[in-house]
Amino acid sequence: MNSSPPTRGLLAQIRSHPAPRFAVVGGVSLVADVGTLAVLHGGLHAALLPATAIAFLVSSLINFGFNRQWVFTGGRTGQANRQILRFYALVALNLLSTLLITGGLTALGLMYLLAKLVAAVANAVANFFLYRGWGSSGEPTDAPTNETHPADTDRLPVGSTGVAAVGGDAVARREQDGSGIDDPGLVAATDDSSPARPRLRRPGIAMTIGRIVVLLLITTAATAGIVSYQVGHSRSLSPVDEFTYVDYLAKVDAGHLIIGRGEHLGSYASNAIACRGILPSVPPRPTVCDNVPGYLYPARNTADIDPPTYYVLTDVGVRALMAVGVTHDLVDAGRLVGIFWGGAALAAVFWLCLLLGASRTSSALVCAVALATSGFWKSWVHITPHASDVLLGALVSAAVVLWARRRAPGWLLLLVGAVPVMFKASDVTVIAAVIVFLLALALWPGFGTAAGQRRLRSRRELLLGTAMIVAGLAAATALWLLVRGHYSLSAVNDFPEFNAPTFQIRWLLDGLGTFAQSLQSPSTVGLAPIFVIWMFGSVVHQLSDRSGNLEVRGLSFAGLTVAIFGAWLYVVSNYVLLHQHVVIPVRYGTTLMPVLLALTARNIRGRVAQLTALVYVVLMMINAFHPL
């Protein structure tokens, strides 16, 4: 008869967990940091910046030593030099995030001590999990230890279902076939001489939710630095229609959810234009700003074509930020909500990368590339419905991939077709991409054998799924057109300058490759071509790999096709529906970028590739604050 092991008390469980010890070490490091700074700057009258650097160095050495020897047992037997390098990489990120968050929030008017507290809390949460997973092996000191092979103790990527691949051979198979870390058939590698290991179980709902929360905390903390800094140092409104989006948000905040066609700008947006200006075309007007009651800027709100979904969700964040006193300016609050749009977007991109079989390191590097890309963070810094593009693109792509693997229900495809266009009409780009993906799988030569190996859906199911996506798109579009027509205030053509009596073939030629262009700003000089070559080179490589996974090749084909020909969808629809021609901007293809980034992550293998990606991220981050 087996006796159950005694249950440890609450105190023993707390002592065995690294989190309390991590908090103690953090407090000791903070005291050392402040004390050293007080002695050097206050007592010895050293210059502030050198004293701050020395104090930070002293406290980080104390932090590393205690964490390595007391908090995480893996540090006792690990390679110290390698761990020090990794630790100081985290220290550099921590310092950068602290400066950005503190400086940005202080520039917005928040008390500097409160801004510092926000930065400290964000970094403390992120640093615990980053250091536990990277700076050391991450096992608590009181946990039992056994002599095992290094391959068995590596922390390997865990996918959306939490199934881990144990052993180098399993990882190699995962990266070769692209099956992704969420494959329930992926189990620990064994040999004939060792006893069989049990199949790894999926974690419970609580564990899954916990991982999602941790991932969101890390990505949100990473996004907070650059967004808060840019918001604090960029007062003028963006020339890309931000004044119309500010007007939409202000009216939603006042309970006016639908902008009627022909509706003029309200007083709040007009005052924001007068106070902030729209550089470089409309300078601020201090004599009008807050001094002329009832002042209205002479313009109509052309954002009436957008459903209110983005503005309603953003207004929830605006009210929360105002309630806690971060800022009392609606424009600044709306921009700061971009921190959460960006954090959720990076978390979704990270998940999509893992889903397609990329390692956690490569996935993190690709997320850093996305954060450093000006075309992404500018949409999070300003009030614009394009702030949701990356998030929607990643979620839609992941949902379709899971459905194709028989891991998601069919009704989800109706949402895939309906939800994106309820944010902005240009989000139809990712819908076109997933439709091409499903059709490519259905019509690909030799699909039957490959489908049997990968447990993908049959041709009939794939074609039916395509029809469901189109049905969801059609239903959402028809519903919004009915609602918008009901609130229309004018039937006048808003843009008569774009009228075109006949269709011209050159429009299609001009639109070729629109979405394949870089999302960088012109000031990035030689960095933008690197981004384009790197990303689309990875996509072409995986498309041309005949021995590769069919699912990945299908996604590569869809991404490349829509990147080259996607603008034609807008050119043709504008002429058919409105008899107009408008030059399609690159940002209309933003929802396509997550799947291209995920495919790129699959190609970042080995230390040389990862180091190259890291160097590119550093250059782009430098450019974000000091254009090259």
Image (cartoon, rainbow, N blue to C red):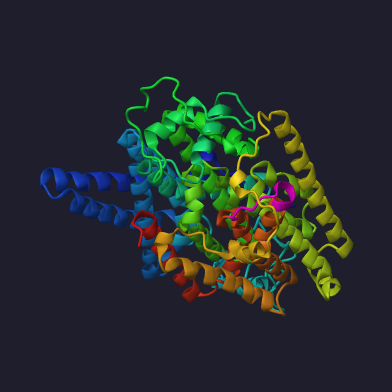
Q: Is 39 in front, or is 620?
A: 620
**Quarter of the view holding residue 552:** bottom right
Residue 571 position (above or below residue 384): below
Asked whether, in this view, residue 196 is left or right of residue 25, the answer is right
Asked whether, in this view, residue 11 is left or right of residue 428, the answer is left
Q: Magenta region: which residues?
A: 575-584
Q: How many marks?
A: 0
Residue shown at 77% from the left, 40% from the top: 478
- The residue sitting at the right extreme is 460
Asked whether, in this view, residue 394 is left or right of residue 573, the answer is left
- The residue sitting at the top extreme is 293
Residue shown at 47% from the left, 27% from the top: 296
**Quarter of the view holding residue 166:** bottom right
Q: Is 621 in front, or is 361?
A: 621
Q: Position of residue 170 (x, y in %)?
A: 66, 72
- The residue sitting at the left extreme is 44
Residue 293 position (above or below residue 153): above
Residue shown at 70% from the left, 49% from the top: 579
Q: Is residue 397 visible?
A: no
- The residue sitting at the front extreme is 501
Asked whether, in this view, residue 425 is left or right of residue 475, the answer is left
Q: Is 318 in front, or is 86?
A: 318
Q: Does the magenta stretch mainly form a helix, a strand or a loop?
A: loop
Q: Position of residue 282 (x, y in %)?
A: 40, 40
Q: Position of residue 560 (x, y in %)?
A: 65, 68
Q: Is residue 338 magenta?
A: no
Q: Position of residue 582 (x, y in %)?
A: 61, 53
Q: Quadrant of the C terminus?
A: bottom left
Q: Is residue 477 visible?
A: yes
